[in-house]
Amino acid sequence: MLRIGKLNENGVLTINVSGSLTKEDFDRHLPELEILLEQQDMLRFFIKLEDFSGYELDALWEDIKFDHKHKNQYGKTAIVGEKRWEEWGTKLSSLFFDAKMKFFYNDQSDEAWKWVNS
């Protein structure tokens, strides 16, 4: 499941991710993200992973296409999770973006929030 929060005054968008991401999640929420990206030159992201188990294949493809299209509009991205593979995934993803991406464990959530807002 994917939940999009409100954009704050620093241009940080909070996204909560739980369970397995499906194509339906992206079909429902990508238009909303598209509008925000049209209105902003750049967005920062605070992504909170909660019991995240990964992507369905169709969802992964939708995410890759969307990220490629908007990669120059992504600013700092803080990803907060609890699993080692989520940290590795963040490091791997950072190779494809100019934006700074950093993984934080759940107990570092406050630090992640401060980092992405600075």
Image (tube, rainbow, N blue to C red):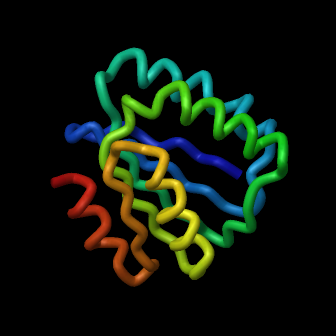
Give me the residue at 37% from left, 52% from top.
77
Q: In the rendered view, does 81 fall on the left or right side of 7?
A: right
The residue positioned 15% from the left and 54% from the top of the image is: 118
Q: Return the residue nearer the eye: 65 or 24.
A: 65
Which residue is at 43% across, 49% downward? 14
- Viewer-closest of 77 and 100: 100
Measured from the top left, where is residue 24 in percent x and y? 80, 36
Q: Position of residue 116 (x, y in %)?
A: 27, 55
**How many marks are shown on the rendered structure?**
0
Q: Position of residue 43 (x, y in %)?
A: 34, 35
Instruction: Give percent across and percent down for residue 60.
Output: 73, 45
Q: Nearer the viewer, residue 112 or 60?
A: 60
Query: What residue do we see at 45% from left, 33% from top?
Result: 71
Q: Farthest residue to the right: give it.
A: 57
**Above or below — where is 99 with respect to 80?**
above
User: Taking 75 as reference, is 31 left or right?
Assistant: right
Instruction: Name the quadrant containing residue 103.
Output: bottom left
Asked if residue 73 lies left or right of residue 91, the reply is: left
Against 38, residue 118 (above or below) is below
Furthest-front residue in this view: 95
